[in-house]
């Protein structure tokens, strides 16, 4: 205790004296150096830190490394981790991942949970070494068992994805909840979702609400959305549109695109909010600019229909391109419809058929029927009743009554 009091006094003196120091080495630094030279490992660590930062002494990387190594060899865990980070980052000395690993391992073997976690992270992400997922899991587990919340979260994530271990929902839920209980905000959000859906745990909407609320209060915008959805749907509590809007709005104002889309849909449909297509358009546009594919599609629909904004097919097509490339079937279908409309300026049968066939490959019966109509009526191409029948029959086999009616019409000729 006396040693710590002395060290803290030195640090306070350094802070106070540094602005007025007339020599490179302050009086407080000299006292700290004396304690370090007498063999005090904690003094060695603080002295190394001073040399690294140039705090109270002239910055001297060689002296910093020397004192960190002395402190580490004397068993100081902070010094071991400091050396590991210095060699891993390669900013003060040439990067040396092997030395970084050696110091992390020494700290881990001495029981430091942070070092255990960083070893897991190194093997997980292949930082200077080949990716080794089983080793990542092994170190994450050691760190998690030692109480490291970050390791608990990542161990849960490894079980969630089946990385280095067999996929296991129960283990996922166990480690996410352990991390949540230790204060990890993202883990709170995932734990809420698992209780809400009954994944890896028995469904418990009350616990889901509690974890969403705790994460939301801590600023997690995805949790705000989850909480809003539960109020909107009346899950685990009475439906409350006002609170749903409150949480969606809070998340949207914190730049959560999913919340922006939710508000856009509320304004578009008049559900929970007064119908306002202009406000719907504004929220969709903001979310689309944040690369949300659902928002891009909704924005395209509004440009296509001229709702909430002026009709503009070119802008509709522009906003549809990214979700279509991401295989969003509704976007692919709408592109086919726009190009297939012979009454519009962008009519292009070749492009229409291309996009409609992509939608049809996903068993979209509406695309099949439109393709049949294009071939039957010769919309921008030569009419081909045989091709039309083939597309109608494909849609009919998938249960489309409209396709069956169109087949009967052709047969009755």
Image: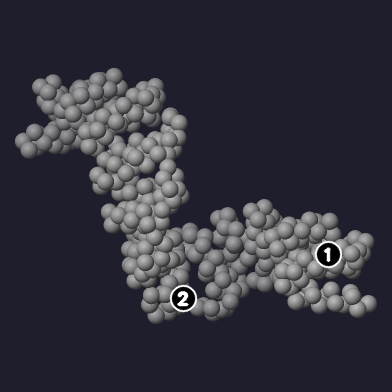
Q: Is residue 266 left or right of residue 113?
A: right
Q: Position of residue 181 (x, y in %)?
A: 28, 57
**Cα–Cα span, label 1 and label 2:** 43 Å
Q: Position of residue 389 (x, y in %)?
A: 85, 67
Label disc, if present, on residue 390 of the rendered structure: 1
Question: Dot 2, crowdedness within 10 Å: few (<14), some or many (≥20)?
Answer: some
Q: From this viewpoint, is residue 217 visible?
A: no
Colouring style = one colour
Which residue shows up at 16% across the image and 31% down it? 42
Which residue shows up at 32% across the image and 44% down it? 141
Q: Which of marks 1 and 2 is in front?
A: 1
Q: In this view, does 254 lie to the left or right of 364?
A: left
121 shown above or below 347: above
Q: Where is residue 371 in the image (x, y as percent from the top left)?
A: 81, 64
Which residue shows up at 12% across the image and 27% down it? 40
Name the residue carrying label 2: 233
Which element carries disc 1, helix, strand or loop? helix
236 shown above or below 312: below
Q: Where, quadrant-wise, is the N terminus in this rendering? A: top left
Q: From this viewpoint, is residue 141 visible?
A: yes
Which element carries disc 2, helix, strand or loop? helix
């Amino acid at each position: 205790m006396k040693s710590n009091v002395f060290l803290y006094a030195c640090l306070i003196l350094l802070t106070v004296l540094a602005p007025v120091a007339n020599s490179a080495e302050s009086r407080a630094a000299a006292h700290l150096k004396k304690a370090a030279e007498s063999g005090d490992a904690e003094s060695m660590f603080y002295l190394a830190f001073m040399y690294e930062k140039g705090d109270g002494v002239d910055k001297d990387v060689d002296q910093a490394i020397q004192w960190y190594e002395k402190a580490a060899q004397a068993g100081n865990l902070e010094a071991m981790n400091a050396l590991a980070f210095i060699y891993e980052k390669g900013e003060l000395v040439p990067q040396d991942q092997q030395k970084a690993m050696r110091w992390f391992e020494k700290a881990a073997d001495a029981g430091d949970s942070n070092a255990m976690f960083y070893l897991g992270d190194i093997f997980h992400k292949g930082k200077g070494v080949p990716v080794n997922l089983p080793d990542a899991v092994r170190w994450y587990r050691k760190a998690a068992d030692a109480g490291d919340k970050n390791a608990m979260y990542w161990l849960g994530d490894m079980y969630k994805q089946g990385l280095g271990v067999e996929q296991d929902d129960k283990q996922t839920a166990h480690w996410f909840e352990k991390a949540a209980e230790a204060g990890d905000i993202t883990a709170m959000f995932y734990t809420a979702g698992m209780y809400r859906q009954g994944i890896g745990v028995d469904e418990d909407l009350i616990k889901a609400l509690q974890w969403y609320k705790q994460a939301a209060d801590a600023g997690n915008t995805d949790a705000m959305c989850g909480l809003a959805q539960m109020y909107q749907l009346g899950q685990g509590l009475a439906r409350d549109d006002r609170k749903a809007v409150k949480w969606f709005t809070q998340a949207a104002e914190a730049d959560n695109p999913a919340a922006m889309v939710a508000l856009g849909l509320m304004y578009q449909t008049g559900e929970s909010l007064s119908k306002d297509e202009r406000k719907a358009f504004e929220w969709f546009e903001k979310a689309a600019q944040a690369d949300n594919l659902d928002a891009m599609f909704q924005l395209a629909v509004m440009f296509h229909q001229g709702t909430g904004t002026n009709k503009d097919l070119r802008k509709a097509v522009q906003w549809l391109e990214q979700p279509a490339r991401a295989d969003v079937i509704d976007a692919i279908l709408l592109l086919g419809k726009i190009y297939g409309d012979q009454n519009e300026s962008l009519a292009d049968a070749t492009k229409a058929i291309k996009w409609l066939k992509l939608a049809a490959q996903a068993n979209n019966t509406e695309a099949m029927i439109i393709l049949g109509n294009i071939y039957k009526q010769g919309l921008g191409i030569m009419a081909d009743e045989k091709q039309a029948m083939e597309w109608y029959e494909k849609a009919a086999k998938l249960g489309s009554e409209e396709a069956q009616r169109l087949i009967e019409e052709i047969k009755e000729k």
